[in-house]
Image: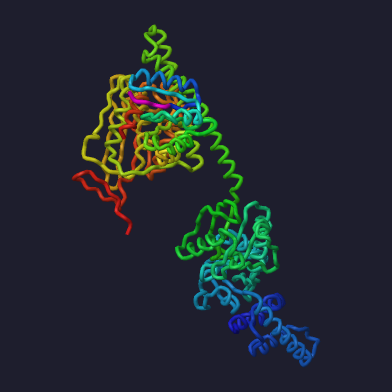
Amino acid sequence: MLKLIHVEDDADIREIAKMSLDLAGDFDVIQCECGEEALARVQDYTPDVILLDMMMPGMTGRQTLEEMRKLPHLANVPAIFMTARAQHAEIEELRNVGAADVISKPFDPMSLADQIKSAIRK
Amino acid sequence: MRSPEIKLNTFKSLSVGGAAAVSWYFATNALLTGPMSNVVSVVGAVAISALLPSYLGARRARYIADNQSLALGQHIDVLNEHAIVNVVDRSTNLTEVNDRFLEVTGYSREELIGTSVHNLYCDENQKLAPTIHLLLSMGKSWSGETPLRRKDGSVFYTHTTVRPIYDLKGNWIGSISARTDVTQTHELLAARDIAQVTDEMKDDIWIVDCDMMAATYMNKVALGRLGLRRAAEQLIPLSQLKGVDGVGSILATCRDMRSTGADNAQFETEYCGKPFHIGVTRLKAGTLKGRFMVVMADMTKRVSEEQRKSDFISTVSHELRSPLTSIKGAMGLLLSRAAGELPDKAVSMLEIAHRNADRLVLIINDILDLEKIAAGRMEFDRQVVNISDLITETKNANATMQQRFAVKVESNSDDSPIWINTDPNRIIQVLNNFLSNACKFSKPGSTVRIVIEDQSDSVRVAVKDQGTGIPIKDQHKVFERFADMENSNRSAKGGTGLGLSICKAIVEGLGGNIGFETTEGIGATFYFVLPKTEANMEITPADNVVKMRSAS
């Protein structure tokens, strides 16, 4: 089982993502509704993959990742962003800050698990 | 310089022509002849004395004639210096010209005599010629403005008076024209008009002289922006504006245009701390010939409006995508039976909702693309790719579409690789559009063919369907946005009405061209042609490795 932390402010999207990952059966999912909550949670937790929404009130996905990277045990954990602003420049920028992949919203719930696994393999 | 021929001919007319000839002498010979000469003083005097009333004594008559000749000679000097004079025969061929005429036109007398004066006319006074000819034939004179062309092709403006001339028997034999050069007045008036017009304009306007390294003119707004005031003799050395950002690039552009011979240039730059669009045009006529007109448009407002619009569209699309993620996600999970089995009718309705949610996503994506195109911000991520791979990928991605519309897709993409330097994702977007349209409009059971054609410098990719084709009346609007075409049935087919206009912008943005061929009832072929590879690209066929040669 892959330990995944999912940070997303939209409760409905959190639920859809949880259902689709549960359906795949390969993930042990922890969900947080903001960057601050996620940072508190990862102090004593080491996930195998971090799934971050980009646009969130308070800390953005990018800021959240930057803070997580400061924690030695999260320095090399693959991070995947989800964004509704799938602009080429923005995607490039996210890759440059160390994103293993950028998943555009709306995502396909039936292939989300495969997309995450493929990004980890990369 | 003198013109003895004119004096001589004038005398001949005068000596025998009676009172009419006398008046012509006073009216025209004064304009025509050069400085007082022996010929005129003797012959002219004799002629006049012969016509004076008989009651005057011969001595007195001689005395008066001498004085008149002297005065006339002096008048002639002045007028000959001032006026441009020519005589033509009835066929408009020049028979005589004065020195001023030669001086102003740049021709020699030998080049002009015997040739038509019309050769010097500009198009506008060619039209006047019949009117003048008619008036002269009726014994009337004509006055007005006539532009003439110099030997070097440049134009000068004259105020002209043309009068008919007659032989001794009173037959009309030609005409004589006296002209005043009004070019400078003309240009001053034009410059004043330009100044009046340009002072009303919101854009900054400069006239730049590269040789003088100066702006010879600036309109009101341009002067105001630089804190300058209009001087009577306006000449602003550009060295005076050295500290102003953007001035260097304006001057560099003017110099570059002078050396390359380019007529126009456009660019954007920071000027006086603001974003400006600069347009430079080479001036080709009048006294400003060889100078450059610089029109500078402040884009601050436009840039901020564009930014606001772009931010708004981006935010709206984000706000729409978030709920769509939940809607599509929930429906997708239900359809995949994540929440258990569903009745057939529920599945059918969910499929409709899911399909339309997909369509909404496409519309949002297309609107974002259109916004980028409109703002000129369509981004391309160029890579060297094998076009066949992109076609295979598109074919695979559209497998569901092929099943849905019961269409078979074939391609010759398995042939040898064709490398192009392009944006693969954008080309896949175009191919997806072509292929999905072809599937949607094909007859069930028919075949869609994707044909790659390796041309010498380019590659042509065509998607050919066996569908209904495009009616002739709709063909002109195929690449228009939301083109309302017969048989398109957008809502049923799941299109956005924007796809082909975006495809056109993409292909053209990548340096290619796009088009279609169709026969109603037989089918349609949509194609694009893209440049193949850049000259500095090296391809190693053995391992399919593509390298960009480093710039040397």
Q: How is the image coloured?
A: rainbow
- In the displayed structure, B337 sits above or below B228; it is above
Along the line of sight, the residue nearer the viewer: B189 or B117: B189
The region drawn magenta spans A1-5
| Count of marks placed on residues | 0
The kind of secondary structure the magenta stretch mainly shows is strand
Residue A104 is left or right of residue B42, and the answer is left
Residue sitting at x 29%, y 39%: B387
Along the line of sight, the residue nearer the viewer: A118 or B116: A118
> Which residue, as the protein is rendered here, is positioned at the far top?
B343
Residue B212 is left or right of residue B523, and the answer is right
Residue sitting at x 52%, y 60%: B249
> Which residue, as the protein is rendered here, is positioned at the far front?
A44
Residue B352 is left or right of residue B199, and the answer is left
Task: Give x and y (percent) for residue B13.
Answer: 64, 79
- In the displayed structure, A121 sits above or below B227; it is above
Locate the N terminus of chain B and report the quarter of the image it occupies: bottom right
Q: Is residue B474 magenta?
A: no
Question: Is residue B544 at all visible to an observer of this figure?
Answer: yes
Q: Is residue A2 magenta?
A: yes
Task: Give x and y (percent) for residue B146.
Answer: 62, 65
Locate the C terminus of chain B and report the quarter of the image it occupies: bottom left
The quadrant in which residue B459 appears is top left
Task: Give x and y (percent) for residue B271.
Answer: 58, 56
The quadrant in which residue B27 appears is bottom right
> Which residue, as the protein is rendered here, is positioned at the far left?
B542
Question: Is residue B96 at all visible to an observer of this figure?
Answer: no
Task: Give x and y (percent) for residue B211.
Answer: 54, 70
> Which residue, as the protein is rendered here, is positioned at the far bottom?
B59
Along the line of sight, the residue nearer the viewer: B484 or B473: B484
